[in-house]
Amino acid sequence: MTPPLPGRRVGQLGWLVREARTMLLIDAANVVGSRPTGWWRDRPGAAQNLTARVRRAVADGTLPPGVVLVMEGEAKKGVDEGHADGVEVVHAAGHGDDTLVALAAKSDTPVVLVSADRQLAERVRQSGAEVVSPTWLLDRLPS
């Protein structure tokens, strides 16, 4: 079992993500950039790898369907926009943070944002979203 988030009961957020109709909204650039894997040499490849891992986690039931990955910049070249295997890929027209905030605000279901960006976290919390770190997600993804 993955350790609980600070300040939360064991399993509280895990239940929200697995059991309730929830949008898991992923700041792909922030997640990819959270570990020094050499991603900066191949941003499209890093985006493709993250997307494949998220889709496998949805397929094996680790993550619920309804995941939304937001891509920006060069990363958009690695993954086509659209819905496949329980994961929707959205290409940000401009800054990815603005797209993430807009998606969180218009959601009619609870939102859990995956990002370590503090300013973005504050912006999405205004629409009632929860925020978890990239480590929370990466610990749940297959290699």
Image (cartoon, helix red, strand yellow):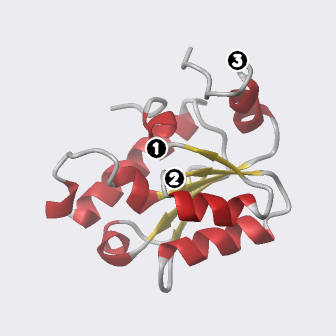
Relative to the observer, which residue lies in front, 15 or 6?
6
CA neighbours of label 3 inside 10 A, class few (<14), some (14 to 19), many (20+) = some
Q: How many angstroms separate mark 3 from mark 1 (CA)?
A: 19 Å
- Residue 103 lies, in percent from the top left, at 69, 69
Q: How many angstroms separate mark 3 from mark 2 (CA)?
A: 21 Å
Relative to the observer, which residue lies in front, 64 or 93?
93
The residue at the point 34 percent across, 53 percent down is: 32
| Res 139 quadrant in image | top left
Write down the residue under mark 1.
134
Marks 2 and 1: CB-CB under 8 Å? Answer: yes
CA neighbours of label 1 inside 10 A, class few (<14), some (14 to 19), many (20+) = many
Q: Is residue 115 left or right of residue 5?
A: left
The residue at the point 28 percent across, 44 percent down is: 35
Query: What amino acid is at disc 2?
Result: Ser
- Residue 20 lies, in percent from the top left, at 82, 38
CA neighbours of label 2 inside 10 A, class few (<14), some (14 to 19), many (20+) = many
Write down the residue under mark 2.
115
Q: Earlier in the sequence, mark 3 or mark 2?
A: 3
- Label 3: which secondary element: loop
Above or below, comparing residue 98 to residue 35 in the picture? below
- Residue 46 lies, in percent from the top left, at 28, 56
Write down the residue under mark 3.
10
Q: Earlier in the sequence, mark 2 or mark 1?
A: 2
The residue at the point 80 percent across, 56 percent down is: 128
- Label 1: which secondary element: helix
Q: Quadrant of the N terminus?
A: top right
Q: Quadrant of the C terminus?
A: top left
Q: Is residue 22 left or right of residue 2?
A: right
Above or below, comparing residue 2 to residue 5 in the picture? above
